[in-house]
Amino acid sequence: MSGSDVDFGAIFIWSLVLVAFLMGMFLLVSHIKRWVKSPEPSIGTGFTLSDLRQLHKSGQMSDEEFDKAKARIIEAAQKASAKPVATRGGVESKLDR
């Protein structure tokens, strides 16, 4: 092939295709990185058992209120641990206990 047979139009088009592909891959990788680094949602109970015990000991909660709140926290923790956890491969599995 001589220098005059080179099709610059095809080279330009394929260069644009390559640049677009590389930009798309960069966006995909950055999106996956953000997804992997995102924090797990919290249970949202608001109180820990330790907080409840302190309120109960200080007299700010009655025995009945303490027992009800403790049961709610334990129930929420059990529900959270029983939920299936999605893995990165798309397969769901439960946490090891």
Image (tube, grey):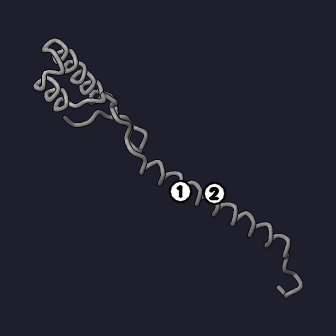
Of the pair 29 and 34, the residue shown nearer to us:
34
Looking at the image, residue 16 sits to the left or right of residue 8; the answer is left
Looking at the image, residue 94 sits to the left or right of residue 24; the answer is left
Of the pair 10 and 43, the residue shown nearer to us:
43
* C-alpha separation, residue under disc 1 versus residue under disc 2: 10 Å
Query: Disc 1 designates what residue?
Result: 30
Q: Could you tell me which secondary element the residue under label 2 belongs to?
A: helix
Query: Residue at left 30%, top 28%?
Result: 45
Q: Amino acid at mark 1?
A: Ser
Q: Amino acid at mark 2?
A: Gly
Query: Disc 2 designates what residue?
Result: 24
Query: Residue at left 87%, top 81%?
Result: 5
Query: Residue at left 53%, top 56%?
Result: 30
Query: Residue at left 56%, top 54%?
Result: 28
Say which of marks 1 and 2 sits in front.
1
30 over 87 or under it: above or below: below
Determine the residue located farthest toward the right in the rendered image.
Answer: 4
